[in-house]
Amino acid sequence: MAKKGDQDNKQPQSGGGGNVVSLPERCPVEKCGKKPTRSAFCEEHFHWFKEGLVNRKGEKPKDFDKKYQHYLKKHRKAS
């Protein structure tokens, strides 16, 4: 059983919380130094991320060339 005095000794933690996440300073895709605008990516690489050309960490998949060619064909038709 807890003693009456133990409850009074507990103090709320201060320090702003431990779940603070720092925002990235640049796009995570290699050789890209642009400032992130959407979901940690620059505008161009955000579209790549949505199409599956890069993952959340900015790494390219093994079949990047195939996916990139499909991406280019798709966007040429739209233009």
Image (cartoon, rainbow, N blue to C red):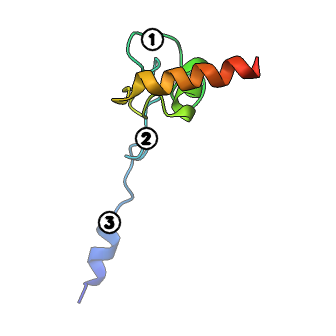
Which of the two discs, 2 and 3, labels the residue nearer the N terminus? 3
In this view, the residue farthest toward the right is 79
| Tag 1 secondary structure | loop
Q: Residue, x 41% and y 46% (percent of image)?
A: 19
| Tag 3 secondary structure | loop
Looking at the rendered structure, the kind of residue marked 2 is Val
Q: Quadrant of residue 47?
A: top right
Q: Quadrant of residue 30?
A: top left
- Can I make out residue 28 in this image? no
Q: CA distance from mark 3 to mark 1?
A: 49 Å
Looking at the rendered structure, the kind of residue marked 1 is Cys
Q: Is residue 66 above or below residue 30?
A: below
Mark 2 touches mark 3? (CB < 8 Å): no
Q: Is residue 63 above or below residue 13?
A: above
Q: CA distance from mark 2 to mark 1?
A: 25 Å
Q: CA distance from mark 2 to mark 3?
A: 24 Å
| Tag 2 secondary structure | loop
Quarter of the figure that contains the N terminus: bottom left
- Can I make out residue 5 in this image? yes
Q: According to the image, label 1 marks what residue?
A: 32
Mark 3 touches mark 1? (CB < 8 Å): no
Label annotation for residue 43: none
Label annotation for residue 10: 3
Which of the two discs, 3 and 1, labels the residue nearer the N terminus? 3
Quarter of the figure that contains the C terminus: top right
Rendering coords of residue 25 (x, y %): 46, 19
Q: Dot 1: few (<14), some (14–19), or many (≥20) neighbours within 10 Å?
A: few
Looking at the rendered structure, the kind of residue marked 3 is Lys
Label annotation for residue 20: 2
